[in-house]
Image (spheres, rainbow, N blue to C red):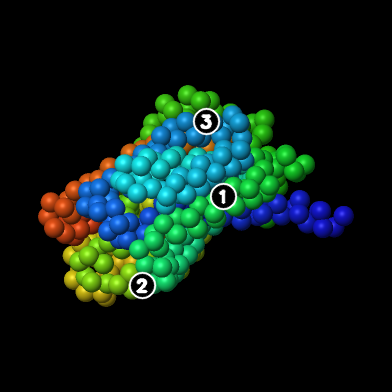
Amino acid sequence: MPANNFVHRNYSWIVLIMGTLVVFGALGLARYGYSMVLPEMQISLEMDNTQAGALATSNLAGYLAFALIGGAVAARIGIRLVVTMGLIMAGGGMLLTGLSDDFLPVAVWRGITGLGSGAANVAVMGLWAAWFSRRWRGLASGIAVAGSSMGLIFTGLMVPWLIAEYGDPAWRISWYIFSGIALFMAVAAYLVLRNNPGEMGMQPVVEEKTNNNNQEGEVASASSSNEKSPSWKEVYLSAPVWFLGLVYSAFGFSYIIYMTFFVNFLVQEYTYTAAEAGNLYMIMGWVSLLCGIIWGSLSDIIGRKNTLVIIFLIHCVSFSLFGLGDASIYFTISAVLYGLTAWSIPAVMAAACGDMLGAKFAPAALGFITLFFGIGQALGPMAGGSIADFTGSFAPAFLLAAAVALLGAIGSATLLKEKK
């Protein structure tokens, strides 16, 4: 039937839309929702900034725990199943976070949430090598990471409204809502996602090559007899993969300081209301909606390495404005700059893994470099919170984030080698 033919021809885009919603649940709510509810949680649970950072670290440690094995597990049992189980775990963790009354149980459930987030996000971001040719992987990855932007918009709008309507219990209600959405996404992901085009009776993804007559020919990217198949050794012992991981760790450490304490900084040090801070958070989300598409597509044109250098430099400026600025105009410019590049580095990294190792091993490579990213993330909030408690301000923590972003730009320029 024509309708069935249409679905078969376009199912890669249906998978991509579902993958974007998976990112919304796994990161947009499970991770970035924490920044919006943190001020109310901190008051309710009587936490200092170090403990607030420790909760973020617990969540990211859970993410890290899955990163090393997650890609390999996905390669063996299938991305669809890993994504579904991950969202169920993240949804359960968020529900139990909202039900907890003390710091320690909250830390445990935030860790469980992170474990589920890592499972769902790492797995689904490794899916594009199977469904899209190298020419389109950067674009596909860029679209998928917009799920994080959706999280900023949704939480920036909803959480301040819940605080205004319900007061002290609002942070708990927020977690219940986040949980319900994640669990719904788990069911939807199981019904919609497929591990590869073959499961839909479709041909494997193809690479496009243009000949001298400007006519396009097609070769199977995942099954070409002329393409050497990578091995597990090339995933875990490859110098380019390790270099990619080291650069990724700089992003993990720097951006998570900025995102974790974004709202707290504005509320505690510059007397923003929850609604005002939420509005700026939401603006950042709106600006970031297309960032992955823009930078992912640009990386398809100018290369992953050059794109990473530019993004890291923009992050350095954005974080510096939060650390050095003393008026709302600086914070607004910072938020817009970060929004323009927010989720672009994960998109470029996912595409780079597909370039290096192809469809079969891309999830494993992405999981492995996410280990480095996760280490950076786990260290960042603890460092930022401790610095804020020691100095009485978050400004030095943001300057540290800027310095590490600069190191990321230098590392991208000097360590990474572009695959020809």
Residue 19 is at least partly visible in this image:
no
Is residue 335 shown to the viewer in this render?
yes
The answer for how far apart the CA atoms under marks 3 and 1 are is 24 Å
Dot 2 lies on which element?
helix
User: Residue 378 — which label?
Assistant: none
Which is more toward the observer, 248 or 420? 248
> Depth check: 399 or 407 in front?
399
Q: Disc 1 marks which amino acid?
A: Leu
In this picture, residue 134 sits left or right of residue 54: right
Q: Measured along the vertical axis of the image, is residue 165 above or below residue 405? A: below
How would you rate the neighbour count of disc 3 (Cα within 10 Å): few for under 14, some for 14-19, many for 20 or more? many
Residue 20: percent from left, percent from top: 56, 54
What residue is shown with label 1?
183
Spatial CA span between label 3 and label 2: 42 Å
Sequence-earlier tag: 3 or 1: 3
Residue 175 pos. (x, y %): 45, 55
Question: What amino acid is at disc 3?
Answer: Ala
Q: Position of 54 compared to 394: left or right?
A: right
SS for callout 3: helix
Residue 322: x percent and y percent?
Answer: 24, 64
Identified at 85% across, 57% down, the residue is 2
The residue labelled by disc 2 is 275
Q: Is residue 267 above or below residue 238?
A: below
Mark 3 or 2 closer to N-term? Answer: 3
Q: Amino acid at mark 2?
A: Ala
Query: Which residue is label 3 attached to?
Result: 72
Q: Residue furthest right?
A: 1
In this view, 289 is above or below 1: below
In percent of the image, x 38 and y 51: which residue is there?
Answer: 308
